[in-house]
Amino acid sequence: MADSTHGASLWKVLGLYAAGSWVVLQVIDVLAQNAGLPQWVFTLALILLIIGLPIVGATAYLNGIGRRSGLKAPDAAGERGTPSSPRQLFTWKNAMAGGVAAMALWGVLVTGWLFVGPGRSADAEAASGSAAAAAGAEATDLRSVAVLPFATRSADAEDEYFSEGMHDDVLTQLSKIDSLTVISRTSVMQYAGTTKPIPEIAAELGVATILEGGIQRAGDRVRINVQLIEASTDRHLWAETYDEELTAANVFAIQSDLAKEIARALEATLSPEVEARIEARPTENTEALELYSRARYLILSAGGMSQDEQARELLEQAVELDPGYARAWAALGTLYLTLKAQGSIPVIEGQRLADEAISRALELEPDLAAAYSARSLYLTDQLRYEEAEEAALRALDLNPGSSEEHRRYARLLLQLDRHDESVEQARRAVELDPLSIQSRASLGDAMWWAGDWQGTVDESLKLIEMAPNLAYAYYNLGYGYAMQDQGEEAIEAFARSAELAPEDPLNRVGLAWAWARADQRDSALAVLEEVPAEASLIKEIAIVYGELGDLDTAYDYLYRAVEEDPGSIGTLRTDHSADPLKADPRYTELLSRVGLEP
């Protein structure tokens, strides 16, 4: 009977140990998944538990023998049983305690890995410094966020514009918060409908947190669910569902609440001034908001002049419905300048319409970043550079996380002959929009104007890797090669740009310039014969004739540019390809006509 009781106790002990081990392994598995622990952590725990199993079994068995042999346990006063027998030490309770100690050892090793990490340097002091730096970087990185395109969960495909509009507005709200790094729209749009894991997306964009969500419109209601995720652990930092009546007031309330909650979750600084701007309600007219959202959708999709014209009609309808809608006025002012540059609106008319719309926007909302950005573009076009810079800096102050604002300011700095600053601003735009073709192209531009020819080539080649069929990448590449006297490579690059975008005559002007720089006059003139002498191209054609040494013809075109598109003269002073024109006595007189000095 004693043997069967002893056997039952042994199996009971082993059963308890197995059950406890299973619980321990489940806890470790959860910790490993959520803390990013390596595989050896789980393996080590399993090995320790396996080693403990026979020890627990053997000591439980020996304990049973000891009890049958009359060994007694210590009494209350600490009196021991037979001192000559070691079996009293081998009890199943002691074995279980040993198991706890083994798991404590596991905890020490894992904690050491978390604080030290793989590849710790032998130099303890240097390693401690690196660990501290890494910890600081991690804390800072947590405030870097990418807002993935919202999934459209409505049956109506037309609602896509609403989802994209909401996504763009949330990005705009977040980019107002200076202590956050927010990846811009162009880069995150590439993940629309993606099945990539969150950690992989975060690594590609260089951020620590991801916001994802979905939008569903049904009749007069809208439902939005969002979640903020820490990429390294896949841990939800914050989540919310909004189910509201579809009104302009509710849409703006959702956007402002999103921005504030994300800032709070990431412990970002939110000043009262910024919070007030985030909480602003641009319009109470739901129909005007719809028109504005549709127009923005067309503009951001970069569909060309026809879509820009449609966007103009929608925005003009929006401000007619709500004359106090400042953001619609600002978007309209910027669009008028774009249409003017495209030749869709006469130069003088485009400038007048833009000025009126931008002035109206600033009158209605004096702290509107988009209005100051549009004002800077308008003033640049008027060659009023000091005022343009003031407006650009104000736009950046109001919207510091906007890659577009940094890119525009970089372009303005080129015309101010402040090239190092221009490159710095262009690099910041790339940091905020790392997968953006436009930002990468802007950086290549800045390097060319700064006289970094090889940097221009390098950035252009990176751009070609991103977009193999982008004509502008080859256009910039051609200029980089030409300035290093790599004539054959330059001609080949410009020819490729003209082949990829035959509808854009600027590419053919570039090819003509490359032929001229290679002393191939006939080839250069043959290409120029195919180019229409339109306002936006006149200065560029003049530069080709300057390279050919035909300064009289070049200045005929330049004087014509002063009359038809004076804004184009602004870049002449810092344009390296225009150097042959600058030694001519007419150069100073030409600049004075538009209020500039050499």
Image (cartoon, rainbow, N blue to C red):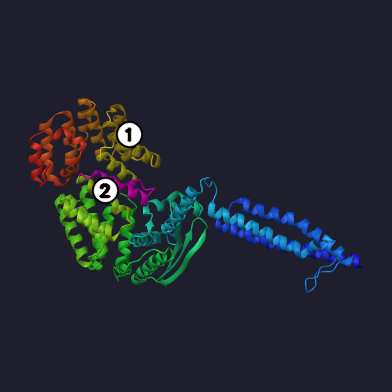
Residue 419 image offset from top left, x and y in percent: 24, 43
Which stretch is magenta?
A: 417-439
Q: Which amino acid does label 2 sit on?
A: Ala
Q: In which quarter of the image is the C terminus?
A: top left
| 37 w.r.t. 322: above or below | above
Q: Which residue does the numbered mark 2 point to in the structure image?
A: 410
Which residue lies at the image location 84% right of the left edge and 67% below the top edge? 81
Q: In which quarter of the image is residue 287?
A: bottom left
The rendered magenta stretch, by its main secondary structure, is classed as helix
- Kindly identify which numbered label has been placed on residue 215: none
Q: Quadrant of the N terminus?
A: bottom right
- Kindly identify which numbered label has been placed on residue 496: 1
Mark 2 → mark 1, Cα distance in angstroms: 27 Å
Observer able to see residue 331: no
Count neighbours of disc 1 (C-alpha within 10 A) and say few if under 14, some if 14 to 19, many if 20 or more: many
| Viewer-side label of 2, 1 | 2
Does 350 sit left or right of 98 as displayed? left
| 181 w.r.t. 326: above or below | above
Observer able to see residue 422: yes
Q: In which quarter of the image is residue 108?
A: bottom right
Count neighbours of disc 2 (C-alpha within 10 A) and say few if under 14, some if 14 to 19, many if 20 or more: many
Residue 441 image offset from top left, x and y in percent: 32, 43
Which residue lies at the image location 47% right of the left edge and 48% below the top edge? 126
Residue 586 image offset from top left, x and y in percent: 8, 36
* Residue situated in front as seen by the camera: 189 or 388: 388
Residue 237 image offset from top left, x and y in percent: 48, 64
Which tag, 2 or 1, sits closer to the chain's start?
2
Does 528 sit left or right of 261 as displayed? left
